[in-house]
Amino acid sequence: MSEATTPVLVGIAQLSQRLSEYTPDAKEPVDLMVDALKAAAEDAGAADLLTRATSVRVIRGVWPYENPASVVAEAVGTPNAETALTPYGGNFVQTTVNQSCLDIQAGKHEIILITGAECGNSKAKARKAGMRAEWRDIPGTPDLLIGEDKPMFHPFEQKVGIMAPIQWYPIFETALRAHNGEAIEAHQKRISELWAGFSRVAEGNPHAWLRNPVTAEEIRTISPSNRGISFPYPKLMNSNNSVDMGAALILTSVAAAKRLGIPEDKWVYPHAGTDAHDTYVVSNRDNLYSSPAIRIAGPRCLELADMNVGDIDHVDVYSCFPVAVQVGANEIGLSQDRPLTVTGGLTFNGGPLNNYVMHSIARMAEILRSEPGKRGLITANGGMLTKHAFGVYSTEPPAQPFKHQDVQSEVDALPTRELAEDYVGSGSIEGYVVMYGAKGFDSAYAGVRTPDGRRTWAKTAEADLMEDMTKAEYVGREVKVAADNTFSV
């Protein structure tokens, strides 16, 4: 392998802005991006990394900027660098690292800056104060778009009213619970214990947003501080997006790292990466409790790195909701008895939307630096358990060049399911969610398998039925779907 084309991660940074109240001089996301890159260069001990970089890559967030990399590049001293942006999706940090490694390996760039930030806490505090977080306009078109921007909702799903992650992921959770044959109470206890383990990891992570440990009982018990969101998930089983967090990664070639005098104890090598997605429209998935894309792309990433799950010392499985962790672990073959996060996950570490994985990679790099020769696996998820990316890292150099595969053709060859729009008749529930409102249960939504094997969606607002759906297993129950897309038992 040539040192000029071997990619290595040399600079990392994670930053938080903790405001007691919003003020107009609060830093906005693009400011955190700039600060994070400067901190990452300081971490590497080489300020020249910033001025010598030829590409600045930003993970898209919930902000108005059109080409934030242009402002970031100017601020860090490389105004002529290529600017890049991703679509929305929590997978795109790892996808961007994968692409950046390939670009360094191909000789397109020698130093690449990757950054992202969200200020959900600032926005929430501004709203509470009757203000609006004023963030600058950054017009323009990036030189490069990394990844595809595809719609992920079918009009019929939207017509029924299923559009948000807090609806979709509980549907997957109840489908998985029934598939595993678990009783509701035992299931709730198990996933709360899983999440309590994530909380304990956050306690030891200096970058985590919520570091006070929370017990499993507190996590599963609805209370004034842990309100019901969407059964079976109270607030403490949801991603915590109300954070102001930024992060940065700096990738170089080994030759550039040596030339700039970056100490080798800072180096972390990406060994392999993969990408794939499940059907963009949930309605077309064969079932609601698994992920063919993870099943193929996760193990393939390990295979490309000449490893298996037993060779991995540390892992961070994407953790927007408990079901994402369970499906990820199931498909990759990771025991749920081992630690499955290095950060504490999106609830306790903090979930800065699409940019969480930049924090998990940075934390993984910190841990690997402190344990030379150990190996780490990063998993990334975007959409409704839709888009997936994987990466293997170690301070030990790979025996072969960085390897990457997009395994989409293999995923696309697997069975899918047809959507039965506006279906009227009988069917059986595959998965469901009961939504909480201000005064109790508000609505419930269910995926319904029709007698001919298709799938439709239906809803109810019947109070007694919704109450019972939180106490008895409704997956597998026969229901009748009416013309107005409601269901009854």
Image (spheres, grey):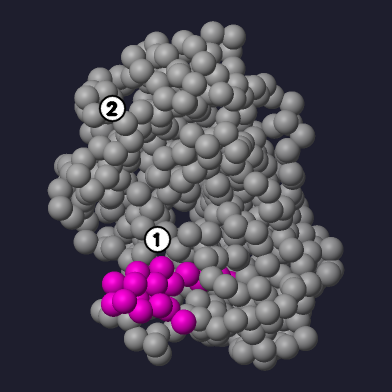
Comparing labels 1 and 2, the label whose residue is closer to the camera? 2
Amino acid type of the residue tagged 1 in the rendering: Asn
Would residue 306 be visible to someone looking at this image? no
What range of the chain is rendered magenta?
Answer: 110-134
Q: At which x and y percent is residue 348?
A: 32, 57
Question: Which residue is at the front of the view, 458 or 135?
Answer: 458
- Residue found at the very far right of the displayed protein: 107
Q: At which x and y percent is residue 487?
A: 40, 21
Residue 110 is labelled as: none
**Image quarter of residue 122:** bottom left
The quarter of the picture where the N terminus appears is: bottom right
Which residue is drawn at the image coordinates 74% and 72% (left, top)? Answer: 142
Which residue bears the numbered disc 2? 462
CA neighbours of label 2 inside 10 A, class few (<14), some (14 to 19), many (20+): some
**Image quarter of residue 140:** bottom right
Which residue bears the numbered disc 1? 241
Relative horizontal placement of residue 7, taking residue 133 as reference (left or right): right
Q: Tell me how far mark 1 sits from mark 2, CA to CA.
A: 31 Å
CA neighbours of label 1 inside 10 A, class few (<14), some (14 to 19), many (20+): many
Question: Which residue is at the front of the view, 182 or 467?
Answer: 467
Q: At which x and y percent is residue 277?
A: 65, 41
**Image quarter of residue 208:** bottom left
Which residue is drawn at the image coordinates 76% and 55% (left, top)? Answer: 401
Relative horizontal placement of residue 261, taking residue 118 as reference (left or right): right
Query: Mark 1 falls on what kind of element?
Result: loop
Amino acid type of the residue tagged 2 in the rendering: Glu
